[in-house]
Image (tube, rainbow, N blue to C red):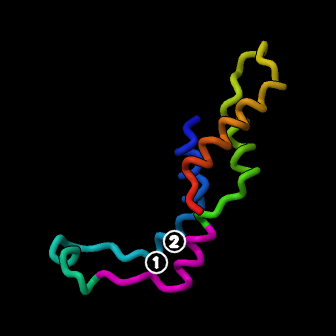
């Protein structure tokens, strides 16, 4: 399981809330025209902030569950190593 994919899927789970408010440029000329670029409104910012702010415990739980091998000889008590790895990755990818 890719940690990056896990986070992307968690953030984009309910994309209709965000993507419906995005403007899609129709042409290169429209894209190049700076007057067509605007700051998002406060409601959009709030919704986006809620989507990119994730609960650390639930992210780590999903990461551990998604990376446990199917090997029946695997010792489930070794999941602490996966939690530590997940914390390190999350710390590296996080932005305060």
- Magenta segment boundaries in residue numbering: 37-50
Residue 10 rendering spot, x and y as whole percentages: 61, 54
Q: Residue at x 56, y 83 (%)?
A: 43
User: Could you tell me if the residues under marks 2 and 1 are in contact, i.e. CB atoms within 8 Å?
Assistant: yes
Name the quarter where the C terminus is drawn.
bottom right
Where is residue 94, by image quadrant? bottom right
Vertical comparison of 15 with 78: above or below: below
Is residue 20 rendered to the left or right of residue 74?
left
Is residue 34 rendered to the left or right of residue 41?
left
Q: Residue at x 69, y 49 (%)?
A: 59
Q: Is-magenta flag for residue 22?
A: no
Is residue 6 rendered to the left or right of residue 23?
right
Specify the label residue 21 is tagged with: 1
Vertical comparison of 29 with 88: above or below: below
Q: Which residue is mark 2?
A: 18
Mark 2 crowdedness (10 Å alpha carbons): few <14, some 14-19, many ≥20: some
Residue 61 rendering spot, x and y as whole percentages: 75, 43
Residue 46 rendering spot, x and y as whole percentages: 59, 78
Vertical comparison of 35 with 78: above or below: below
Q: Residue at x 33, y 73 (%)?
A: 24
Mark 1 crowdedness (10 Å alpha carbons): few <14, some 14-19, many ≥20: few
Residue nearest the viewer, comparing 25 with 94: 94
């Amino acid at each position: 399981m890719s940690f990056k994919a896990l986070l992307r899927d968690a953030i984009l789970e309910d994309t209709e809330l965000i993507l419906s408010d995005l403007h899609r440029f129709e042409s290169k000329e429209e894209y190049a025209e700076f007057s067509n670029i605007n700051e998002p409104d406060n409601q959009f910012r709030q919704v986006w902030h809620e989507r990119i702010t994730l609960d650390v415990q639930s992210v780590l739980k999903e990461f551990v569950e998604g990376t446990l091998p199917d090997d029946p000889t695997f010792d489930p008590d070794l999941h602490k190593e996966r939690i530590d790895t997940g914390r390190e990755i999350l710390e590296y990818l996080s932005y305060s």
